[in-house]
Image (cartoon, rainbow, N blue to C red):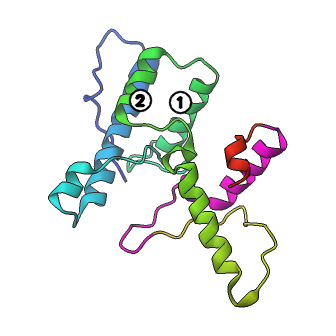
């Protein structure tokens, strides 16, 4: 877990308490990203280290070592953006940090479709019939050598439910309906 130290997100004495708290949480996010990078690049080649990109997500339940609910704060920022009440400078700073506005944005639609195909193949071996369902809590199996995390964007069951909802509402893109 990350220990959040204030200072790197430009704070000034003239800022209100709300702005100082926001800056403190942004500092916490930046430290989370650095910690995640250190963890992820261990054992990679120099080129792979150079190409590393944060997946843009913080698990909802994540708390820093000093107890700050960073995951919940990130979700609050996403919510504020979707409601149109996130200040422009804050949105830019979060985007500059690499935050993804949609939890599922870090897995492309095609990657998730590939994961669904793998799931179906696993569940139709030896002539078994698949009932067309994926449990809501079913997570993508991580590839060998990849650390297992509580990332919500690895939840295939939730993704499938979202596609069904979009389809029923007439909002699923036509090219995705035939995939």
Image quadrant containing the C terminus: bottom right
Horizontal side of residue 27 vs 45, given as left or right: right
Image quadrant containing the N terminus: bottom left
Q: Are marks 1 and 2 in contact (CB under 8 Å)?
A: yes
Residue at the image position 38 percent from the left and 32 percent from the top: 26
In the image, residue 138 above or below residue 168 = below
Is residue 17 visible in this depiction of the protein? no
Q: Which mark is residue 13?
A: none
Q: Residues within 10 Å of mark 2 (few under 14, many from 20)?
A: many
Magenta stretch: residue 164 in it?
A: yes
The residue tagged 2 is: 94
Residue at the image position 46 percent from the left and 19 percent from the top: 18
Q: Which residues are magenta?
A: 143-170
Magenta stretch: residue 155 in it?
A: yes
Q: Residue furthest top?
A: 14
Q: Residue furthest bottom?
A: 126
Residue 56 pos. (x, y %) = 43, 43
Residue at the image position 53 percent from the left and 30 percent from the top: 77
SS at circle 2: helix
Q: Residue furthest left?
A: 46
Q: Considering only order in the chain, which callout, 2 or 1, is on the residue closer to the N terminus? A: 1
SS at circle 1: helix
Horizontal side of residue 9 vs 133, given as left or right: left
Is residue 124 visible in this depiction of the protein? yes
Horizontal side of residue 115 vs 41, given as left or right: right
- Which of the 4 quarters of the picture holds residue 93? top left
User: 122 or 30, which is in the foreground?
Assistant: 122
The residue tagged 1 is: 77
Residue at the image position 53 percent from the left and 43 percent from the top: 105
């Amino acid at each position: 877990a990350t220990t959040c130290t204030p200072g790197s997100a430009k704070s000034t004495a003239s800022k209100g308490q709300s702005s100082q708290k926001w800056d403190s949480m942004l500092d916490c996010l930046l430290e989370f990203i650095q910690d995640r990078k250190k963890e992820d690049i261990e054992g990679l080649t120099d080129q792979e280290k150079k190409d590393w990109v944060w997946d843009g997500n913080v698990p909802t339940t994540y708390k820093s070592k000093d107890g700050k609910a960073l995951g919940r704060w990130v979700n609050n920022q996403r919510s504020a953006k979707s409601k149109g009440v996130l200040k422009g400078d804050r949105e830019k700073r979060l985007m500059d940090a690499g935050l993804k506005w949609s939890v599922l944005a870090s897995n492309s639609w095609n990657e998730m479709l590939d994961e669904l195909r793998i799931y179906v193949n696993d569940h139709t071996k030896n002539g078994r019939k698949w009932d067309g369902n994926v449990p809501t809590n079913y997570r993508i199996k991580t590839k060998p050598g990849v650390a297992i995390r509580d990332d919500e964007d690895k939840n295939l069951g939730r993704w499938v439910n979202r596609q069904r909802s979009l389809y029923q509402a007439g909002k699923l893109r036509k090219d995705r309906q035939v995939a």
